Image (spheres, rainbow, N blue to C red):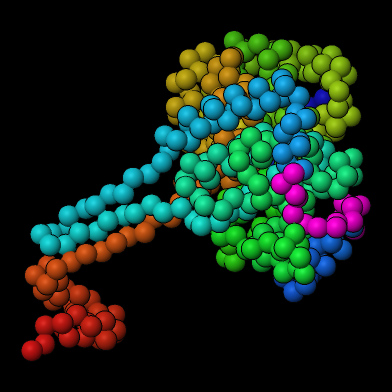
Amino acid sequence: MLNRIDLRGSSRDPRGLLPRAQLDVSVAVERIRPVVEAVHQHGFSAIREATEKFDGVTLERLRVPVAEITAAEAALDPDVRAALLEVIERARKVHADQRRTDTTTKVVPGGTVTERWLPVRRVGLYVPGGLAVYPSTVVMNVVPAQEAGVEGLVVASPPQVANGGLPDARVLAACALLGVTEVYAVGGAQAIAMLGHGSDGADEADRCEPVDVITGPGNIWVTAAKRLLRGVVGIDAEAGPTEIAILADETADPRHVAADLISQAEHDPLAASVLVTDSPALADAVEAELATRVVRTKHDERVRTALTGEQSGVVLVDDLEQGLRVVDAYAAEHLEIQTRDARQWALRVRNAGAIFVGAWSPVSLGDYAAGSNHVLPTGGCARHSSGLSVQSFLRGIHVVEYDEAALRDVAGHVVTLADAEDLPAHGEAVKARFER
């Protein structure tokens, strides 16, 4: 079922050899540019038109009435409520410890630099709603923003035909549990455009004030819109289809490995499931497990498409040292380490969105109830980007305070460098303070 890539005996850089979904975001940007520009220029009417076209829903208003959010919470299945409350509590524990404190450095007597950490004022949190619905993503977006101290939290999620043109009821209920009342029934590129540019409508329910930062996963059209609006607003990352890589040796249980590969393939036909192993016997055993498990899973067609696609496969390596180089090159959104001494190998990984160590830490745990965040970089972006955290909503601002003596002491160096860069007015701005 899985493609095999044999890197044994190879010393080449593995990056160009590894399976990866081929998504051309730049093409998608040009496809959605007219939508984004129309929303910028026409607000509610353009959002309504795009929603009719892409979601099959005619919007009467953008904003979800608070009464609908409250009603969704009241109707929530008790078991789902208990699970969401547990997820919220665990996420708060982890994200509360990420808060930053101001730091003041005494550079010289009379001269200090303080780094202050301040939250952005208003954020737009996108919650997808295509092949699946994600109340857990509400938690993963909202909790770090709240812990950062963000004042204005806005959730946008696609309208569902089955829910009367509102976002999924479980998404609305999760918003209620977190105290979020500004929710918009808008999805796709038009939602990102609305959050970035705002919407001026005739009625308050048709208006949305622009945000400062947009976070949250989505499909390629959401990703393209975020790229287009980067600079107008801050974004967390360009999220593509989900992916899992598993570094495993002969001690791994093939049942666990197969089940975990299927768990991510369940998301999307473009989802990537990659096994990196130095054990051909394990690879064979995992293939056998997949053959029996895929036909029993609910979304078997979707899973099969993902597992047999060019983005998924088994990578055979000589040993775990080569395997470590391979997973670092791949830079997976989710990386599982299922080896002997798993923690020691995990601590040597440089590139991953999140690392799951040992047999009892599956990715599914991180998707819901580990306390970690599941909004993570994909497509190799873990080489340079982090998952969503409190830090995603904070800005570091340097506050510089020098007295007269401290400035006088360094004035000569400032003037010298200003002259060296042919910016004499910079030096004059210092010298003017000591003119008599």
Spot occupied by residue 76 in the image (x, y as percentages of width and height): 75, 29
| Up-down relation of residue 389 to residue 300 (above or below) | below
Indicate left or right for 113 with 68 as reference: left
Give the position of the N terminus as an image quadrant. top right
* Residue, far bottom: 436
Front-lying residue, 409 or 160: 160
Q: Image quadrant for the C terminus?
A: bottom left
The reply, left or right, for residue 361 in relation to residue 56 is left
Residue found at x 51% / y 32%: 92
Point 54% across, 27% down: residue = 89
- Residue at point 78%, 27% (across, down): 2
Viewer-proximal residue among 27 and 53:
53
Percent of width and height locating residue 392: 51, 48
**Residue 63 sits in quarter:** bottom right
| Magenta-span inclusion, residue 372 | no
Q: Is residue 164 left or right of residue 25?
A: right
Q: In front: 127, or 314?
A: 127
For residue 78, above or below residue 242: above
Residue at the front extreme of this rendering:
67
State which quadrant residue 123 falls in. Answer: bottom right
Range shown magenta: 53-67
Residue 226 coordinates in the image, percent (x, y): 66, 57
> Looking at the picture, how far across and down is residue 347, in whole percent?
44, 27
Left or right side of 148 for 28: right
Task: Specify whether residue 209 is in view.
Answer: yes
Residue 284: tell me if it is visible.
no
Closer to the camera, 181 or 211?
181
How many numbered circles are shown?
A: 0
Q: Does the magenta-highlighted stretch encompass residue 64? A: yes
Q: Main secondary structure of the magenta part?
A: loop
